[in-house]
Image (spheres, helix red, strand yellow):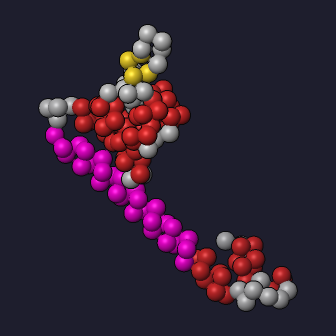
Amino acid sequence: MNIGQLSRRTGVPIDTVRYYEKQCLLPPPTRSASGYRHYEADDVLRLNFIRRAKALGFTLEEIRELLALSSAHDGDMAAIRSAATDKLVDVEQRLAELTRVRDGLRQLVDACPGHGALDQCPILTALGGEA
């Protein structure tokens, strides 16, 4: 299949497919005599893997590591589980930080009546105060 067909089958834009090739996340495709890229079913599977891993928050470097681990046919799933556990811890930490930010913003918004003089604005006071 050509790059357009690969893009449609996976939902990954053509430019992104080329970028993943440059980043060595996808192996170099075979080329026709006229220079067109030709992809196989394994490329669809690999690109779907990359797309799903990205959706779960894995970075391209982490995806590269997952792909390397998954290609070690004699390997153990412990390394994959460990990588997923590390990503889960990272996501939970970011969620905790976002919850803290949300709660702080909610307090500021709730404290502000939304009208009146700026020098009485609790949001500006809180943001401009000393730490």
Residues 45 and 68: in front is 45
Residue at horizontal 17 percent and vertical 31 percent from the top: 73
Residue 20 part of the magenta-drawn span: no
Residue at horizontal 75 percent and vertical 79 percent from the top: 125
Where in the figure is residue 47, as x and y percent of width and height?
Answer: 37, 37
* Left-right relation of 125 to 103: right
Where in the figure is residue 96, as x and y percent of width and height?
Answer: 45, 68
Q: Identify the image quadrant of the C terminus.
A: bottom right
Q: Identify the image quadrant of the N terminus.
A: top left
Magenta segment, which residues? 76-103
**Residue 84 in view, yes or no:** yes
Q: Is residue 58 above or below residue 88?
A: above
Residue 100 part of the magenta-drawn span: yes
* Left-right relation of 32 to 103: left
Residue at horizontal 60 percent and vertical 83 percent from the top: 107
**Residue 20 in view, yes or no:** no
Q: Is residue 50 above or below residue 35?
A: below
* Left-right relation of 45 to 106: left
Residue at horizontal 41 percent and vertical 51 percent from the top: 55
Q: Is residue 25 above or below residue 124?
A: above
* Residue closest to the far left: 74
